[in-house]
Image (cartoon, grey):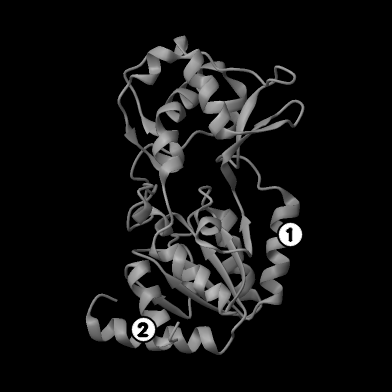
Amino acid sequence: MNATADLDDALAQLATFVTHPRRLFVLTGAGCSTASGIPDYRDRNGDWKRQPPINYQAFVGGEYARQRYWARSLLGWPAFARARPNAVHVALARLETAGFIHQLVTQNVDGLHQQAGSRRVIDLHGRLDAVDCLACGHRQARAAFQTVLERNNPAFVAQVATLGPDGDADLEQADFGAFRVPGCPRCGGLLKPAVVFFGETVPKARVERASQRLAEADALLVVGSSLMVFSGYRFCRQAAERQQAIVAINRGHTRADTLLTLKIDADCAAVLNGLLARLTL
């Protein structure tokens, strides 16, 4: 909905949707964080804008894949870590404080919802600000690991690259075979960011917790997600099976378009700020 009249009508419907159920399950995606300077993966049609992110099997199965991943992450992390919440995160935090949000589940790995003040957050795909050892389970802060990466790879620190989604960076003309990937400081094992890679399964307990919270809610609100990844889309299917209303605020196509009660194809921040004004928040 791009015309002003259409958006006004959509905001009126959205305000009714939010105030009548009151217990909302909110699912967010990359569109929430683009205004914070973190690029997204997909275009308006839900197609890839760039090469898909690294696959889990490739990461654990090949040293060169890990060298390439961590070399790009070395350059992408600083800008990713500097990202701050934008109006979308702030609006959702205010809706939670006002009692409208029962649970927020985010597909993002940036922690910006928590920085904005949201407390009822499930990080469906984990968090990029931590690094796990796949052998012993030791966890360390990504910021601390950055120091080790830089110390081991001074030649890469000077490289210039464009920031990609989720702390990645576009770095193609480099000798990744020369990149030194540190092992776990405790056992020497293989280190991986504490996020769910493509091809990797979201931890069962995390999915079950989110599904239970959806069952307790009255309706589902999707913000800034094309829902092309099943891990998020599953909640729309569950809501539809329970005959819960589903509203999406997203630019372009979503995988759940046929399941939606209302779709608002507009800027997420503009819509949520308009909603806050209508709710006098």
| Image x and y of residue 198, in percent | 55, 41
Q: From the viewer's perspective, tell me whether residue 162 is left or right of residue 275.
A: left
| Image x and y of residue 250, in percent | 39, 66
Q: Is residue 29 visible?
A: yes
Give amino acid for label 2: Ala
Pointer 1: what residue? 208
Give the crowd class for mark 1: few <14, some 14-19, many >=20 residues within 10 Å: few
Identify which residue is drawn at 73% across, 61% down: 209
**CA separation, marks 2 and 1?**
32 Å
Q: Is residue 175 visible?
A: no
Pointer 2: what residue? 10
The correct choice, above or below, for 161 with respect to 127 in the image is above
| Image x and y of residue 270, in percent | 33, 72
Give amino acid for label 1: Glu
User: Tag count in the figure?
Assistant: 2
The outermost residue toward the left is 3
Label 2: state its secondary structure: helix
- Corner quadrant of residue 114: bottom right
Quarter in which the C terminus is drawn: bottom left
Q: From the viewer's perspective, tell me whether residue 210 is left or right of residue 45.
A: right
In the foreground, 53 or 230: 53
Label 1: state its secondary structure: helix
